[in-house]
């Protein structure tokens, strides 16, 4: 960055590194240095966004085999962290991904990967419906959901009876039979140190090639975001998932999923991809 006299007042740099905390993916590690008078939030945002744009141009030209598909920033200055407490820093696209051993914030901005999922849009096919049932699952619906899970060999009976209270949405087919179920479990995530909703979506085997699972997941995000916005439910900061499906891990490994949601933040101890979608406006603790 130069001032109006052409003098250098700040420098940004990136280095390609494999980061264990992010599944050993190669990613740009970002640093910047500003002279004291230029150390403002607006200048940091301006310089980071220019760097992100330059890395996007490189990725578009070189592809993911040659160029990293994301930028990692470690925020060491606690005053900056306090000024920008949002889990998703909208002005930069940076998503909170945990902390370093030193306790510093680690954030990642994933780029738009060629052929990726970020801009995928899928409509619910004709004949299917999705209904929110959060907090209103009566005895009859509970038995229907349990029977669905058992008929599909999804989970054991004892687990099904425990989990039925976590049902947030159901999908039905043209014959009014359950086609898919989405559940939310409230937990504190140890990696992020935040309370989150753990989401699971299960779709009937015969509808796995439909958009039911996709639409169940994203309509659940919209439904819970609306509740968060209205102040009806703010105990969690967002929605978290562990991707168990190996095929999905291989074919949908991009940093961001559809609608730019569910940022990849690493693998769990079982090698499953971890993804998080924070609610807009949600803030970190402390």
Image (tube, rainbow, N blue to C red):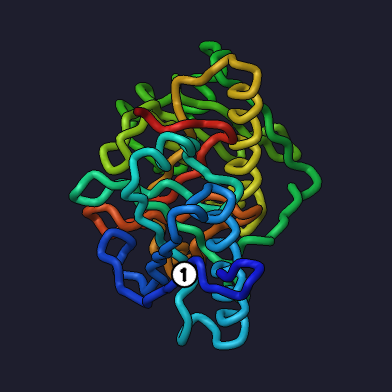
**Residue at coordinates 37% horizontally, 74% vertically from top-left?**
26
Q: Is residue 82 left or right of residue 205?
A: left
Q: Residue furthest front?
A: 5
Q: Is residue 65 visible?
A: yes
Image-quadrant location for residue 6: bottom right
Q: Residue furthest right?
A: 126
Residue 41 at x, y percent in the picture: 53, 47
Residue 267 at x, y percent in the picture: 31, 57
Question: Where 127 sits versus 133, above or below?
Answer: below
Tell me the quarter of the image containing the N terminus. bottom right
- On the image, numbered disc 1 is attached to which residue? 12
**Residue at coordinates 56% horizontally, 79% vertically from top-left?**
59
Judge by depth and name the residue closer to the eye, 120 or 112. 112
Which element type, helix, strand or loop, lies under badge 1? strand
Q: Residues within 10 Å of mark 1 (few under 14, many from 20)?
A: some
Judge by depth and name the residue closer to the eye, 127 or 21. 21
Residue 269 at x, y percent in the picture: 22, 53
**Residue at coordinates 42% horizontally, 73% vertically from top-left?**
14
């Amino acid at each position: 960055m130069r001032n109006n006299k052409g003098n250098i007042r700040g420098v940004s740099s990136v280095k390609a590194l494999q980061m264990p905390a992010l599944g050993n993916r190669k990613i740009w590690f970002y640093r910047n240095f500003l002279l004291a008078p230029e150390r403002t939030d607006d200048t940091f945002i301006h310089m980071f966004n220019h760097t992100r744009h330059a890395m996007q141009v490189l990725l578009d030209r070189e592809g993911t085999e040659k160029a990293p598909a994301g930028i990692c920033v470690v925020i060491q200055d606690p005053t900056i962290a306090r000024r920008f407490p949002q889990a998703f820093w909208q002005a930069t696209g940076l998503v909170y991904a945990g902390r370093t051993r030193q306790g510093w914030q680690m954030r990642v901005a994933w780029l738009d990967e060629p052929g990726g999922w970020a801009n995928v849009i899928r409509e619910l096919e004709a004949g299917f419906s999705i209904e929110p049932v959060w907090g209103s699952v009566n005895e009859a619906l509970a038995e229907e959901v349990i029977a669905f899970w058992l008929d599909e060999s999804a989970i054991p009976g004892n687990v099904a009876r425990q989990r039925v209270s976590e049902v947030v949405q159901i999908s039905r087919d043209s014959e009014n039979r359950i086609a898919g179920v989405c559940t939310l479990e409230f937990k504190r995530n140890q990696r992020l140190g935040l309370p989150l909703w753990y989401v699971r979506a299960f779709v009937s085997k015969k509808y796995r090639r439909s958009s039911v699972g996709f639409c169940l997941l994203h309509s659940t995000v919209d439904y819970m975001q609306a509740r968060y916005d209205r102040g009806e439910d703010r105990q969690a900061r967002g929605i978290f998932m562990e991707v168990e499906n190996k095929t999905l891990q291989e074919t949908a490994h991009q940093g961001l999923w559809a609608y730019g949601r569910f940022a990849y933040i690493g693998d769990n101890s079982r090698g499953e991809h971890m993804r998080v979608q924070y609610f807009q406006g949600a803030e970190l603790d402390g």
